[in-house]
Amino acid sequence: MLNAKIGKVGKVLVCGMKGVGKTALIEQLVYGHVNPETELHPTIEDIYVASVDTGRGGARETLRIYDTAGLQGEQQQLPRHYLQFPDAFVLVYDPMDPRSLDMLADIKTDIDKHKEKKEIPVVVLANVRARAAPNPVEKIMDRANIWCQRERIKHYTVNAMERPSLYEPFTSLCARLHPAQTKSTFPQLRQVMQNRQKSEA
């Protein structure tokens, strides 16, 4: 229909160190076909579009998910243009590699410097690849939990091979990007709106 309402599309940037599983997470979330034999190539830049359930009675919203090249070596900062356009950030790390968590702290600092006084949701995902987490992984996850609490950002444990583990972080992020419309607390305005709707019907 020509008069169908098109909602705002949320722009989400997924970033982190090279090799932590960013592309596998996105491919699993959007398509659901990633398994241990799936061949994924290093990403330069890619864009995915997903229709995500907001958890509000079947309402769905659209997310445009930007997959970025993994940061490594000398390049430990996101290019400036990546910091300007997103409505939200998903920071991914591998709990088997403490350097990947350390890199997220630098990325978060850059995000805070460039957010221009607006509230931008940030979510941290620990991409756990093994079922039984060895002791060093638990220490890194504890460090990540403490850092996320201090920064007031949500921390989720996910597995790129298990699609259901990805639902909660992205549903929560989508709900924050597209908050539910609240009814007016002004009774006069509410009455005017109801009268207008009746007269248009």
Image (cartoon, rainbow, N blue to C red):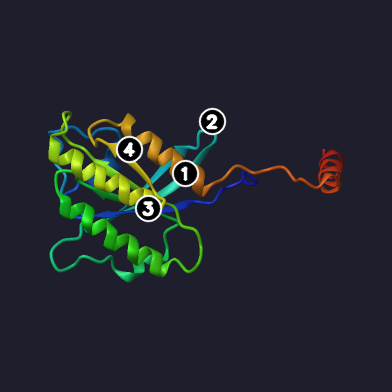
Which quadrant, please, contains the C terminus?
top right
Q: The residue under label 4 is which amino acid type?
A: Leu
Q: The residue under label 3 is which amino acid type?
A: Arg
Picture mark count: 4
Find residue 20 and report its horizontal and vertical position in percent: 19, 48
Mark 3 and mark 1 lie on one chain; the one further toward the N terminus is: 3
Q: Quadrant of residue 79?
A: bottom left
Q: Is residue 114 above or below residue 95?
A: below
Q: Residues within 10 Å of mark 4 (few under 14, many from 20)?
A: many
Mark 4 and mark 3 lie on one chain; the one further toward the N terminus is: 4
Residue in the foreground of this view, choosing between 83 and 7: 83
**Residue under pointer 2:** 58
Discs 1/4, front: 1
**Residue under pointer 1:** 174
Q: The residue under label 1 is which amino acid type?
A: Cys
Find residue 59 and report its horizontal and vertical position in percent: 55, 35
Discs 4/3, front: 3
Q: Is residue 47 above or below residue 170?
A: below
Q: Residues within 10 Å of mark 2 (few under 14, many from 20)?
A: few
**Residue under pointer 3:** 150
Residues at badges 1 and 4 in contact (C-beta under 8 Å)? no
Gap between marks 2 and 1 measured at Cα: 13 Å
Gap between marks 4 and 3 measured at Cα: 28 Å
